[in-house]
Amino acid sequence: MDELAELGRQLTQAFRVARESPEAKEAEAQFIQAIRTLEAELKAAFGALQERTQSSTFKEEVVRTASTTAEEASANWPLAAQCQSQDR
């Protein structure tokens, strides 16, 4: 049993040394920087996608409003209906 405990201590020490080595610290720093860069790029991509979606929704709403307004004008003012039919 003492042999297993000693093996456990040796493995723990080996992992600690490996984790604290300059190479491991450099790899960790590079990994963290890569994650931060990825995070920034994803935020920018999602922001652009959200803007395009909002822009598209806004455009659709403007078209829908214009169409509704034209229909209401046609129904309420016969002269507007004549102008609209001439435009088509």
Image: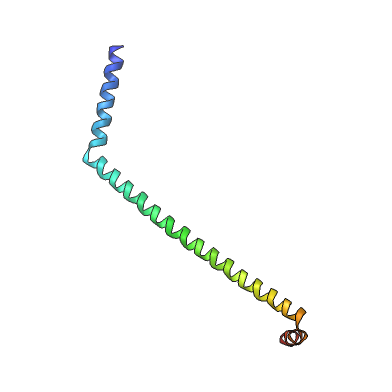
Image coords of residue 20 (percent x, y): 23, 36
Residue 85 or 76: which is nearer the viewer?
76
Image coords of residue 62 (percent x, y): 61, 73
Q: Quadrant of the N terminus?
A: top left
Position of 44 with respect to 75 (left or right) is left
Residue displayed at 28% across by 46% down: 29
Residue displayed at 65% across by 76% down: 66
Image coords of residue 34 (percent x, y): 34, 51
Q: Quadrant of the C terminus?
A: bottom right
Residue displayed at 66% across by 71% down: 64
Asked where in the image residue 61 lies, by quadrant, the reply is bottom right
For the view shown, which residue lies furthest in the top direction?
Answer: 1
Q: Relative to 19, say whether 61 is above or below.
A: below
Residue displayed at 40% across by 57% down: 41
Residue 62 or 6: which is nearer the viewer?
62
Q: Relative to 43, say whether 83 is above or below.
A: below
Image coords of residue 69 (percent x, y): 68, 76
Residue 87 or 4: which is nearer the viewer?
87
